[in-house]
Image: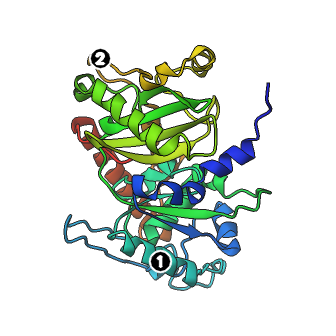
């Protein structure tokens, strides 16, 4: 049995290493190298925003009428007017060059972007944005998500391969969850396809089963198979229409690296050992053929931390105190999260991954 070089595989799956190979078949992206001082800042647990994030800033999208308001922990309204009994605040970080690069990248992508680090998106930090969205419209959104995400923090840990650290901004697209699929490749053969949002039921999948498989197989054989450097890997695609399949990401094959969704890796390995060349044109495609009611989806368990809610909701500060003003802000955030959760429960529209 060959010993896997996990670090080499991870490097191959970094978007910085495959984006140019598939530029015509993926979503437009800006890849921003992260300087050493910013990496050190992102590794720290303290959630203090850089000075470039304005105290209160509003960005309005003419097409959506969207508006966000950001509050800075260094705002005077949260400070003591006397200041005699307060410890001096920590020095607020500042990264003008990096922040400008992020701002320029967001603007170049139309003013809205999907953010991720080298391997992960900050899906565990959606709770910290007022709309509970991964849509980034300014640097405050970007810094908030990066700092609050444990998934992204893992990507900024020290590593010895010398590949550097990156923040990736992709042009924002509203993606229907029933149009995303995960594909499993073993020994350069496409073995299986699963809906990315497993186990959710989408009626159109059963109706379009053959077309979905044919479109994905065509993309794999024509664009990916002989181009992507690994023999074993997983790739995600988005199929907005017939004959149109877009590469979303690549990740490592195997348990502990990428979720197998509708499949089991042991069974996939067994199937790969007896697979024939002819079978590559018809990979196994598993999906829910019937509506089985509401099913638990792992990605939906992320929300604002329970201890975060308990701490602020149980606090009973004196009237007019600094803590009281801070709690009001946090409570508004929690109320917004709760309203969004209620809306999501009654709304069947898709969200962005």
In the depicted structure, whether residue 83 falls above or below residue 297: below
Q: Secondary structure at mark 2?
A: loop
The residue shown at (67%, 51%) is: 11
Question: What x and y, as percent, mark residue 113?
Answer: 39, 63
Q: CA distance from mark 2 to mark 1?
A: 48 Å
The dot on residue 53 is 1
The residue shown at (60%, 53%) is: 14
Q: Quadrant of the N terminus?
A: top right
Q: Secondary structure at mark 1?
A: loop
The residue shown at (65%, 60%) is: 45
Question: What x and y, as percent, mark residue 267?
Answer: 58, 15
Whether residue 140 is visible, yes or no, is yes
Question: What x and y, as percent, mark residue 272?
Answer: 59, 20
The residue closer to the viewer here, 250 or 100, is 250
> Which quadrant of the view contains residue 328?
bottom left
The residue closer to the viewer here, 174 or 27, is 27
In the depicted structure, whether residue 8 falls above or below residue 1: below
The residue closer to the viewer here, 124 or 305, is 124
The dot on residue 138 is none
Q: Which residue is mark 2?
A: 289
């Amino acid at each position: 049995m060959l010993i896997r070089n996990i670090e080499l595989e991870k490097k191959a799956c970094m978007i910085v290493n495959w984006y140019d190979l598939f530029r015509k078949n993926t979503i437009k992206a800006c890849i921003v190298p992260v300087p050493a001082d910013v990496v050190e800042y992102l590794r720290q647990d303290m959630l203090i925003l850089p000075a470039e994030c304005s105290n209160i800033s509003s960005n309005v999208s003419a097409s959506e009428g969207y508006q966000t308001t950001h509050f800075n922990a260094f705002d005077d309204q949260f400070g003591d007017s006397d200041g005699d009994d307060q410890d001096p605040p920590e020095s607020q970080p500042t990264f003008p060059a990096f922040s400008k690069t992020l701002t320029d990248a967001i603007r170049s992508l139309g003013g809205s972007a999907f953010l991720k680090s080298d391997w992960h998106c900050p899906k565990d930090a959606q709770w910290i944005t007022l709309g509970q969205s991964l849509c980034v419209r300014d640097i405050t959104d970007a810094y908030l998500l990066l700092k609050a995400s444990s998934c992204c923090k893992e990507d900024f840990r020290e590593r010895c391969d010398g590949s550097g650290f990156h923040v990736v901004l992709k042009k924002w697209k509203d993606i229907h969850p029933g149009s995303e699929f995960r594909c499993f490749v073993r020994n350069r053969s496409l073995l299986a396809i699963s809906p990315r949002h497993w186990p959710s039921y989408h009626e159109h999948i059963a109706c379009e089963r053959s077309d979905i498989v044919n479109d994905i197989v065509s993309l794999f054989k024509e664009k990916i198979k002989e181009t992507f450097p690994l023999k074993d890997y997983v790739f995600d695609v988005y199929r907005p229409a017939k004959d149109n399949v877009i590469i979303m990401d690549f990740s490592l094959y195997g348990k502990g690296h990428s979720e197998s969704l509708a499949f089991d890796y042991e069974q996939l390995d067994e199937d790969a050992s007896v697979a024939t060349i002819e079978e590559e044109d018809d990979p196994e495609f598993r999906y829910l053929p019937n509506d089985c009611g509401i099913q638990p989806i792992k990605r939906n368990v992320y929300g604002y931390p329970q201890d975060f809610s308990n701490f602020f909701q149980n606090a009973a500060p004196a009237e007019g105190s600094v803590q009281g003003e801070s709690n009001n802000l946090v409570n508004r955030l929690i109320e917004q999260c709760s309203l969004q959760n209620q809306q999501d429960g009654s709304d069947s529209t898709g969200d962005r991954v």
